[in-house]
Image (cartoon, grey):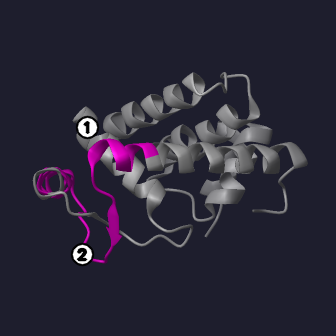
Amino acid sequence: MCDLETPAIRQARRNLGRFLQASIEKRRRDLGFGWQLTNEAPRTYAELRHAFQASQLHRHPLPVRPLATGDGGFLFWHDTTHAMLNHDFTPEGETAVARHQLLQLQMAGYPPTSMEHRVLTADSLSHIHCGIQIGRYPRDSATFSTRAVLQGTDQAIALEAQRP
């Protein structure tokens, strides 16, 4: 959470949390395996494909990197989407994965005009655009995403580019 968040954004994040938990659990059930946090998790798409195939074959957890923001469930959902759709970690691959996940959100009842859709768009596509335009992802993801929702992606990127 950041100081800029409005009550509507906070509520949308709570709703997104529920959507993500349901999506993560469904993916775990559908695939027959979950995830395990490890610093030895795949860092390249080729490593992810190999780990994903091994998890499918042996039904053991997919190794995922520990994130400061959670227990690894989101990264499990995100990485398995990469592997299932055969999209690499290039900006084009990341964009395709983000669009697929936004479509899943829409199919769950959150149209593109909803605050939930706007927040997930900021958390995904706006971050990708930032990486393309300034050569790195935002240093403060929550503040960047909130700015993208409230002020637009271009303004959020311009402010992020000024950060040391």
Q: Is residue 3 above or below residue 37?
A: above
Q: Residue drawn 21% across and 57% down?
A: 44
Q: Which residue is mark 1?
A: 84
Q: Where is residue 35 shown, x and y percent of the image?
A: 33, 63
Asked where in the image residue 93 lies, by quadrant, the reply is top left
- Up-down: is 29 above or below 40? above
Q: Which residue is mark 2?
A: 40
Q: Which mark is residue 21?
A: none
Where residue 76 sits, quadrant-wise, is: bottom left
Q: Earlier in the sequence, mark 1 or mark 2?
A: 2
Whether residue 136 appears in this view of the structure is no
Tag 1 and tag 2, C-beta contact below 8 Å: no
Is 77 displayed left or right of 8 in the figure? left
Residue furthest to the right in view is 7
Horizontal and vertical percent for residue 163?
64, 64
Q: Which segment did they paint magenta?
A: 26-54
Kindly report the distance in space between the C-alpha atoms of the residues bearing marks 1 and 2. Answer: 21 Å
Number of other residues with Cα within 10 Å of mark 1, as a class: few under 14, some 14 to 19, many 20 or more: few
The three-letter amino acid code for the residue at tag 2 is Glu
